[in-house]
Amino acid sequence: MRKAQFLVAGMLVICARVIPGNAAILYGTARTASPPWDIGDIYKIDTEAKTSTPLVDISAALDPDAPPVDPLAADSPNGNALDSELCRFYFTTFTSPGTPANRSGPASQLYYVDLDLDDGGSFVVIWAGALKWHASDGAFYDDKYWYIGHGRRSLRAVSFRRDGTIEQDKVVTKIQLPGPKPTFLSFGDIEFDGSGTLYLTGAIKNQEDQRVRYVSGTVDIDTGDFDEIGESPGVYWGQIGFGPDGVLYGHDAGSGEFYTVDTFDGSVTTIFEDKDRTFTDLASSN
Ligand SMILES: [Ca+2]
Ligand SMILES: [Ca+2]
């Protein structure tokens, strides 16, 4: 039976918008801040009004032909990315034990929903396919969805067929992390700025599977060179997204704070907080 869809008749969604006064509209996924976990919603975050508003109820809007989005691990849904041209919002899901600490868990499923409903229709969450690995980071650039798998150090890019399903999921480069052969234990996020530089934030672990520390910085997607930003080991931006204003925004799922990030020194400035939900990820809207 077809599930009821989240009706948005008459609601105008503007995909990428610059608000006067150095602010932006961003999109992200969130779920309840404590068990029992719900499946989650896609939210619109207005950094000027300092509000986060539910936009798409993921389970209610799921295409009946798509695989179910549950049961999910606590950090799912995640892997947000926005194709600003199509206003197409991507997210990943992963099931337990597909947790950041277990790289051998089931691969993430990739879904998308078109947010620009100028005809007043309803949102439909479409299944694009299964990724090679499970991931809690994602970005959109050069018509591809990019991610790094939990417990890996390779950056992958996913291309799509005309019908929106996954065509190829292949390694672009291996990221050169500091220290003896570390891999990414888990991720805040990855996102590209307007000039195509990739920013990332995540936790790295060593060969003994121990968490080393959080890192934040940029990656050269041709060479894999990693350039860390911020000298303090405490610098950690959480989930990140560039606004159409060129500003890097972040979110800390623990404190519930949304902030702006200074990309030169890694320092953050709090804008507002939402303690009612855990925002698992953000997407750039640049
Ligand atoms: Ca992202
Ligand atoms: Ca994330």
Image (tube, rainbow, N blue to C red):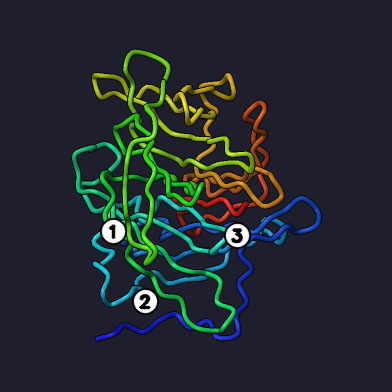
> Which residue has dot 1 on it?
129
Q: Which residue is mark 2?
A: 60
| Residue 37 screen position, x and y as percent | 33, 60
Q: Is residue 48 left or right of residue 165?
A: right
Whichever of labels 2 and 1 marks the residue nearer the N terminus, that label is 2
Q: Quadrant of residue 58?
A: bottom left
Q: Secondary structure at mark 2?
A: helix
Mark 3 or mark 1, which is nearer to you?
A: 1
Q: Tell me what residue is drawn at x 56 percent, y 71 percent.
A: 116
**Labels 3 and 2: the sequence-earlier one:** 3
Residue at (65, 52) in percent of width and height: 272
Mark found first going from the N terminus, 3 or 1: 3
Q: Vertically, is 70 above or below 218? A: below
Q: Nearer the viewer, residue 208 or 141?
A: 141
Q: Is residue 223 left or right of residue 170?
A: right
Q: CA distance from mark 3 to mark 2?
A: 21 Å
Image location of residue 113, percent across then percent down:
44, 67
Helix, strand or loop status at disc 3: strand
Identity, as a three-letter code, of the amino acid under mark 1: Gly
Left or right, 111 with respect to 1, comes to right
User: Residue at image x 76%, y 50%?
Assistant: 22
Pointer 2 and pointer 1: residues touching (CB < 8 Å)? no
Residue shown at 35% from the left, 50% from the top:
75
Residue 279 is situated, as x and y percent measured from the top left of the image, at: 47, 53
Q: Amino acid at mark 3?
A: Ile
Q: How dense is the environment of label 3, judged by Cα within 10 Å: few (below 14), some, or many (20 and up)?
A: many
Q: Is the residue marked 3 within 8 Å of ligand 1, measured from its CB? A: no
Q: Which mark is residue 45?
A: 3
